[in-house]
Image (cartoon, grey):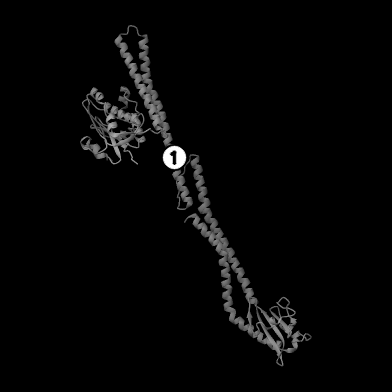
Amino acid sequence: MKIKTWLLISYFVVMILPLLSAYFLFAWVGSYHNEQKVEEYANVYTEIQSLKDVLIDPALYDPTSSKEEIEKLTSSELSISLYNSDGLNVYSSNVNFDNVQQATSKRLYENLYELQQGLRSFKYKEPVFEDGNIVGFFDIEIAREELISTIIKRGWIVIGLFVTTFILIYAAIAITVNRRLNKRLYGLMDEMSAFASGNARAETETGKDEIGELKQHFYAMRKQINAAREEIDREQKEKEYMVATISHDLKTPLTSIKAYAESLNATEGLSFKDREIYQNIIIDKSDFMKQMLDDLITHSLLQSREYELELVTVDGEEFFDMIISDYEALCDKKNIQLFACNIVHGEYEVNPKQMMRVADNLMMNAIRHTPESGKIWIITLSEANNLENRLFEFVKNAYTFDFTQYAYLVVQNEGEGIPAEKLDFLFDPLYQVDQARSKKDSHGTGLGLSITKQIIEKHGGEVEALSKENIGACFICSIPKRNEE
């Protein structure tokens, strides 16, 4: 049950409790009154008849007559008042009763011969005659002491029940509030304090009320913060590793440049051909360092969440035909057969420079890992046009193309392939499948595939690597089609 619901219920119970108590008292007294009504009425009527035998004496209504006999009849529960024919009060046993010195005619003749039953007393009034003339009136009032006593007694019982019930309800609400509010809120505060100090506790039962929802939001927030912390730690370690690795990778070409530069200056009798070789080595090492620094800057820029690529609208057929061309010369150097195919229609929003970098990275990677006389396919397509004949069988079985939303850039090469256990790390910065060979040959910086993945994701697409050992590898990049709306 929601906290709001049971609080409203408890408020309602506390508010209605006095009304229920008053109703219970009224019903209880009413029930007692109904039970005693007939018997009490008969007893009072009998008592009045016995009093009438005394009060019908005309002599009593003479102001000068003695009232000793009447005084013997009166008590704290019985009051008698006598009036002469003119309404003058000639006797009253109790001034606390409603008596007046001179009664009006209306008062004297009102409710004659009628036994009136009130909450506190019975009243009876009757005229007295002598020789057919009214000589006076007597007014009898009998207090209902038993009823008043019962009402008082039962009132105290009801008050006691009310107080007891109120205390029980108060205690129940206090215990419930402590269990459902205070205890749980203090527990949540302790969990928050522990989390803030770095000592996260295990999740506890949340419940379905407002505090349960609050705990659920806190646990969700804690997971997000932990995930963000882990991501920051991962990025920090990645940056530290990158700095250390690039520093080490830059040291090798710098050492070579320094050594060959010193040789050019210090060595006497160095032939022109040797000088040319040394100069070319210095230029190659400088180009490698420039490429590494350029890749590092690009990678750092793409990692920023605030950085957005500037996209322009291009014609798909013209643009993708451009980015898959001009790789024949590089493939011919290694005696590699290149199959280029472009089947793209429509318009796309891309960053031309970065998309060309993607194609370059994937093609350089494919050329590097394709043996001589091997084959490379670079395909761009926006529809399944004879696609099955251009892909490896394991690619067709493992990947599903969605041409309704994407166009695709596919780079596939024959070769040793990539071990399955290394595919998950392929797009990590500075990761190279064959570390020893890469360092020896100084091919690439280890950032190319990571940069490729980030560029494609900035375009709203995905890149996936598929491979099978001793057959080859395939990289598939999806590029979203332009939304006309």
Q: Is residue 475 left or right of residue 289?
A: left
Identify which residue is drawn at 38% across, 28% down: 298
Q: Nearer the viewer, residue 149 or 353?
A: 353
Q: Is residue 313 left or right of residue 129?
A: left
Q: Residue furthest right?
A: 64
Q: Residues within 10 Å of mark 1 (few under 14, many from 20)?
A: few
Residue 376: x and y, percent?
A: 24, 29
Residue 275: x and y, percent?
A: 32, 11
Q: Is residue 213 above or below residue 112?
A: above
Q: Residue furthest bottom?
A: 131
Q: Nearer the viewer, residue 129 or 226?
A: 129
Q: Inspect the image, locate mark 1, and give the three-letter code of the amino acid beneath it.
A: Asn
Identify which residue is drawn at 34% across, 22% down: 288
Residue 100: x and y, percent?
A: 73, 78
Whether residue 364 is visible to the viewer of this picture, yes or no, is: yes
Identify which residue is drawn at 36% across, 14% down: 259
Q: Which residue is mark 1?
A: 226
Q: Nearer the viewer, residue 114 or 318?
A: 318
Within the image, what quadrant is residue 14 found in?
Answer: bottom right
Q: Nearer the viewer, residue 164 or 466?
A: 466
Q: Is residue 387 left or right of residue 85?
A: left
Residue 115: x and y, percent?
A: 63, 82
Location of the C terminus (image quadrant): top left
Q: Is residue 206 above or below residue 146?
A: above
Whether residue 431 is visible to the viewer of this picture, yes or no, is: no
Identify which residue is drawn at 56% across, 62% down: 15
Q: Is residue 93 left or right of residue 347?
A: right
Within the image, what quadrant is residue 64 found in?
Answer: bottom right
Q: Give the number of marks.
A: 1
Q: Residue furthest top?
A: 269
Circle 1: element type: helix
